[in-house]
Image (spheres, rainbow, N blue to C red):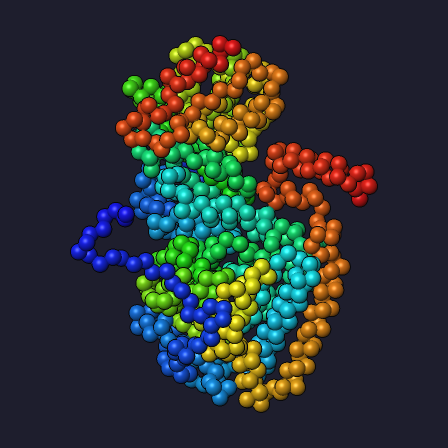
Amino acid sequence: MSEPATKTMNMIEAINSALDVMLGKDPEVVIMGEDVGYFGGVFRATAGLQKKHGKTRVFDTPISECGIIGVGVGMAAYGLRPVPEIQFADYIYPGLDQLVSEAARIRYRSANDFICPMTVRSPFGGGIFGGQTHSQSPESLFTHVCGIKTVIPATPYDAKGLLIAAIEDNDPVVFFEPKRIYNGPFSGYYDRPVEPWSKHEGSAVPEGYYRIDLGKAAVVREGEAVTVLTYGTMVHVVKAVVAEQGIDAEIIDLRTLLPLDIETIEASVKKTGRCMVVHEATRTSGFGAELAAQVQERCFYHLEAPVERVTGFDTPYPHSLEWAYFPGPVRLARAFDKIMKD
Amino acid sequence: MVQGIKDNLAPLHLHVPEPKFRPGDQADFSDIVVPEVDAISRPDEHTNPADIHALAYGLVRVLGDDNQAAGSWNPGLDADTLRLMLRKMLLLRAFDDRMFRAQRQGKTSFYMKSFGEEATSVATTMALHSDDMCFPSYRQQGILITRDYPLVDMMNQIYSNSGDRLKGRQLPIMYSAKDYGFFSISGNLTTQYPQAVGWAMASASRADTRISAVWCGDGSTAEGDFHSALTFAAVYNAPVIFQVVNNQWAISSFSGFAGSERTTFAARAIGYGIAGLRVDGNDALAVFAAMQWAANRARTNGGPTLIEYFTYRGEGHSTSDDPGAYRAAEEYALWPLGDPVTRLKDHLIAIGAWTNEQHDALILELSDHVKVIQKEAEQNGILGHGLHHPFETMFEDVFEEMPWHLKEQCEQMLEEQRDKFGPEWEAR
């Protein structure tokens, strides 16, 4: 049997491929959102899909996130499998009630009478000079809500496999796409040339159907000195800093924040005895707080230093001072110095 | 000192609406215009919405002061159908009375009656096909009763007992019945509006023949979801029927807090370019006729309609409020559109298809029927008396498959129960 055909894809192409595969495989899948139809999306994630699959499968919507998510809930109640796009994660708030009070609760409140197999895709995160309304990382709002799964890929290969699994999941999934790495794995050294995905092994993407199960983390670098728990853009930043600093870190890309792969985390921290959590989102009540709590509950007697958090600051995402806000190489290096000292 | 005042300009005023009557006032509804039957005749279902704006400000009526049905909106229902409609409305009223009393007796936490608004859930449902999808708000139990959903299942839900199909998870009256075309009720208001549009869009995209109908109250038209829903429905010409049950009151806030001092709720349709009808909500035949018009329109790709039922909430918002604390006492008795059950009864008597004796006998029969069912439901327990679903069901259905963290929490909860109830509980 021959290997399935793979192609070098950036993250946008991989997401587009996942959507294309699922539109072809499952007639109940529909895609809707602002500018996703004829134009193919502001980031081109749905380019060509309307032409190929038709206007009733892939279509533009009014500028109303409440409407997009609410209509998606109704379509799911009918029996469809909607995959709405929210153009930027920063725009998701008008749809929050429909996600939190409706999509997330329908299975529970109706005791399985109605379900909501909907995947909400949305670009998130900063590093693109998007200012405070095009840069946010609101993932912890969703991990805090019971009934929603939250997924964040860090490579084209993972993006496609996870998105297919999310669409096939019978519960609502929020799928945040780190837009800084749509076109290349950002190292955090913003003044250096950007690497293309083609030089990264995660860009070899099978053209057909495959899935990566939700709830499974990936150990992207094995190490003995310290465990780093991270996801999205920060996976690549951490990798670059670890290489630069020569630290024998074990880097875990969580991939799914909820349900969390606690076994992989626990095994790693017990092995290394140190744990750093890294995310771009604001610090207070961020997902890093949950990770730190889980680690101290399960691995306290293995820890040789306090769990270290490296995050964005508790301010809105600034435009001109973006790189002072971003948890980049300097902040990471200082945190590594601190956690390795003890 | 207020900043920015200029001496040469008149001061601005903030208008905070106030209802005409408060407790102690003499209610007087003589300013409410009640047009003649057929004041605006029934247009063809495919009329351009722009040509029927007057219907959004008028009041569709079929039953006249002489208790006869007349005019172009008269749906021409036969006597058997009219008697069935009356029976369903009376059953709803009997059910409401019994369950309200059960709450007062401490058998459950909460109840909401639909007294005075029965036509807006019963007559509407009779005008739909049985497989059309209803997205109710919290006061449309008449849909389930009209579609012959088992009363015992409604009561089990109200008691949150071991027979509750929703496993005791929802506040009483927040039913869900997919097999009966009844969407799961949310406590968050008007969220069902865009959902009904999505369902209708899905139906249309599948070349299905079913349509959806959605209800909300006057107060909750102020929610953003209402406007998102009307926009989407207009954009995609969705086969959906929007209904606003304007019962004048949102708990203690009168309809002025949703904008009724300036225009009608039906007139919200005009800005979206969809059909709008304002209907006498206490005239069951007018309600039926309006729904039938809108359903015909939706089913033949004519698009959405917004119907306002002008009615009155005859009792409190729920068991949790006392309307005597915020509105004049005798408003319902003075309401110029009367009582929907009385008006339908009087019509049936006027056409020689019903008698007062039959009516009284039917009320007794239905009341006894509801009591019998209530006893049956109470075999499954009442709220707070132990006969609930097993503890571990608390953790089921959050997701299709229970993740590890919920399994852990479930085990913790079971250990708490062991601590609390001891070994006997373990052997249950």
Give the residue drawn at x 64%, y 56%: B109
Residue A180 versus residue B185 in the image, above or below: above
For the point 37% across and 21% down, which residue is it?
A328
Closest to the observer: B388 or A246? B388
Q: Residue furthest front?
A: B1
Q: Position of residue A50 (x, y in %)?
A: 36, 46
Q: Judge left or right: residue B52 versus residue B381.
A: left
Q: Nearer the viewer, residue B226 or A255?
A: B226
Please tell me which residue lies in front, B139 or A24. B139
State the residue at coordinates (42%, 83%). Answer: B37
Pick the quarter of the image with the C terminus of chain B. top right
* Res. B348 image quadrant: bottom right
Q: Is residue B288 visible?
A: no
Image coordinates of residue A253 in percent, x first then y, are 48, 25
At x 64%, y 71%, the residue is B94
The residue nearer to you, when weighing B409 against A30, is: B409
Residue B79 visible in image:
yes
Name, please, the residue furthest toward the left: B8
Residue B82 position, x and y percent, is: 56, 80
Could you tell me residue B326's position as x and y percent? 50, 64
How many numbered marks have been drawn onto this rendered protein structure? 0
